[in-house]
Image (spheres, rainbow, N blue to C red):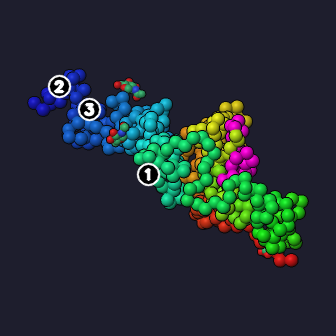
């Protein structure tokens, strides 16, 4: 009798379909299921957990964002709100990729954020104010003004002076006043010896620039000791990250990093077509949202002809240009993730591009130098943020 049954199963096509061991067929034991990475689940052959059914014939391993896929189930099994598009797992529209394992919904003002893009998806005027550097922060409006979860639109006037920080003079008065008597630090332009001496007793105004009376090779107008690319505060000599210049908040004791009309600090981005001329933080160049009154900060932000991205920005492998500070900041910003080359970022591999090399060998953007936060992990970017003192006469 049993033999007859077996014979029936072998020769009746319908029975073959149901007991054949393929996906969806009946089974008693795992061994009954013949498809690779399938098992017997409640009497039916099914793919193992974290394997996606494909074409009803295969079990494909689920994968992380940016990895090749054949079916969306491979993506969303592992990362919620992701899908398989053009053969690669990506976040659904309206979600932001975070590392390889998360698709984030936009962060509202006041909510926890992992990057400024995360905030800007909700409100372009907001940014992520990091509480723990490069890890997380809260979305904040540029001038701190918000109405519930949105930033209040200020007119596209130059950044207003910070409200709660003391600022001795208005921009023009300060500039004129300082030319007469305010202290001027080593390496910056001066008119009188007195200005230089007010900042460092052993410096004088030489050829329009404050320089040491005697130079010993390690400290002079040419070698002020600050990291390359940082902005030097005129009075105190403190050096700050270029990212902080013209960002709407004064970081120099005298607020000179926020004198951003007409003559711009060298490290800022000049909105050349806008009248009157204003300058914005160079960190806003190519960030995907216009910040200059005429939007010139978002011009030429795709390097199609392979001639390079605008100065100070980073070129992704796919030719898109992103803010230079996005390089090795532990957040994938390039669509292809090429702004986080692991070997260069963690100092373990060759670096074809290394704007700022930390003492521990890691590569970072020059924006981290003197930003007030340890961007290297060994604090080497936060040393040398005060100019050297001239040797005594
Ligand atoms: C899909 O399944 C059919 C049989 O059902 C098979 O002939 C075909 O090769 C499969 N395609 C892929 C891409 O595996
Ligand atoms: C995102 O994924 C979660 C978990 O799968 C789901 O509950 C939610 O509805 C998804 N959101 C959208 C907008 O698709
Ligand atoms: C740096 O990243 C590479 C690639 O992921 C890894 O193999 C290496 O162990 C990492 N090195 C350090 C020091 O973290
Ligand atoms: C030069 O002068 C500075 C300031 O006094 C001092 O710190 C430095 O060690 C001197 N360098 C040399 C080579 O003498």
Count of numbered circles on the image: 3
Q: Which part of the image, by quadrant, shows the C terminus? A: bottom right
Check if mark 3's residue and mark 2's residue have beta carbons within 8 Å. no
Q: In this view of the protein, which residue sits in the foreground, 227 or 41? A: 227
Q: Earlier in the sequence, mark 2 or mark 1?
A: 2
Which element type, helix, strand or loop, lies under badge 3?
Answer: loop
User: Where is residue 9, by image quadrant?
Assistant: top left
Which element type, helix, strand or loop, lies under badge 1?
Answer: loop
- In percent of width and height, residue 95 lies at 44, 40
Q: Magenta region, mostly helix, strand or loop?
A: loop
- Left or right, residue 151 beside residue 269: left
Q: In this view of the protein, which residue sits in the foreground, 209 or 134? A: 209
Whether residue 269 can be seen here = no
- Left or right, residue 229 beside residue 288: right
- In percent of width and height, residue 369 lies at 66, 59
Whether the magenta-drawn stretch holds residue 274 is answered as yes
Q: Earlier in the sequence, mark 1 or mark 3?
A: 3
What residue did someone put label 1 on?
A: 110
Magenta segment boundaries in residue numbering: 257-275
Please give the name of the residue rendered at 55% of the width and 59% of the height, measured from the top-left corner.
164
What residue did someone put label 3 on?
A: 24
**Does label 2 point to a residue whose CB lies under 8 Å from ligand 1?**
no
Q: In this view of the protein, which residue sits in the foreground, 78 or 251? A: 251
Foreground disc of the pair 2, 1: 1
Foreground disc of the pair 3, 2: 3
Please give the name of the residue rendered at 63% of the width and 45% of the height, measured from the top-left corner.
158
What residue did someone put label 2 on?
A: 8
Which element type, helix, strand or loop, lies under badge 2?
Answer: helix
Spatial separation of the CA atoms under disc 2 and disc 1: 69 Å
Q: Earlier in the sequence, mark 3 or mark 2?
A: 2
Foreground disc of the pair 1, 3: 1
Q: Which part of the image, by quadrant, shows the N terminus? A: top left
């Amino acid at each position: 009798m049993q033999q007859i049954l077996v014979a029936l199963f072998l020769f009746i096509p319908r029975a073959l379909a149901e007991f054949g061991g393929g996906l969806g067929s009946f089974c008693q034991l795992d061994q009954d299921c013949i498809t690779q990475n399938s098992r017997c689940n409640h009497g039916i052959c099914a793919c193992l957990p974290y394997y996606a059914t494909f074409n009803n014939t295969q079990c494909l391993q689920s994968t992380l964002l940016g990895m090749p896929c054949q079916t969306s189930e491979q993506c969303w099994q592992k990362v919620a709100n992701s899908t398989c598009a053009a053969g690669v797992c990506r976040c659904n529209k309206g979600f932001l990729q975070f590392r390889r394992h998360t698709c984030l919904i936009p962060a509202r003002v006041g909510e926890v954020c992992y990057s400024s893009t995360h905030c800007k998806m909700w409100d372009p005027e907001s940014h992520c104010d990091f509480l723990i550097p490069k890890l997380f922060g809260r979305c904040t409006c540029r001038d701190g003004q918000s109405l519930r979860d949105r930033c209040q639109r200020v007119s596209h006037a130059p950044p207003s002076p910070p409200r709660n920080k003391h600022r001795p003079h208005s921009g023009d008065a300060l500039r004129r006043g300082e030319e007469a008597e305010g202290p001027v630090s080593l390496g910056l332009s001066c008119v009188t010896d007195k200005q230089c001496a007010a900042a460092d007793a052993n410096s004088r105004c030489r050829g329009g620039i404050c320089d040491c009376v005697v130079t010993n090779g390690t400290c002079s107008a040419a070698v002020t000791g600050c990291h390359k690319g940082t902005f030097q505060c005129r009075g105190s000599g403190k050096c700050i990250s270029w990212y902080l210049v013209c960002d709407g908040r004064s970081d120099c004791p005298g607020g000179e990093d926020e004198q951003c009309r007409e003559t711009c600090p060298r490290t800022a981005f000049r909105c050349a077509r806008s009248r009157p001329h204003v300058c914005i933080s160079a960190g806003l160049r190519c960030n995907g949202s216009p910040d200059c009154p005429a939007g010139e900060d978002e011009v030429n932000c795709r390097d199609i002809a392979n001639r390079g991205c605008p100065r100070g920005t980073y070129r992704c492998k796919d030719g898109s240009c992103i803010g230079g500070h996005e390089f090795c900041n532990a957040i994938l910003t390039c669509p292809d993730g090429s702004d986080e080359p692991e070997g260069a970022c963690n100092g373990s591999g060759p670096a074809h591009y290394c704007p700022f090399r930390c003492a521990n060998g890691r590569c970072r953007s020059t924006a981290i130098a003197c930003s007030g936060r340890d961007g290297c992990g060994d604090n080497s970017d936060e040393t040398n943020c005060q100019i050297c003192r001239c040797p005594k006469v």
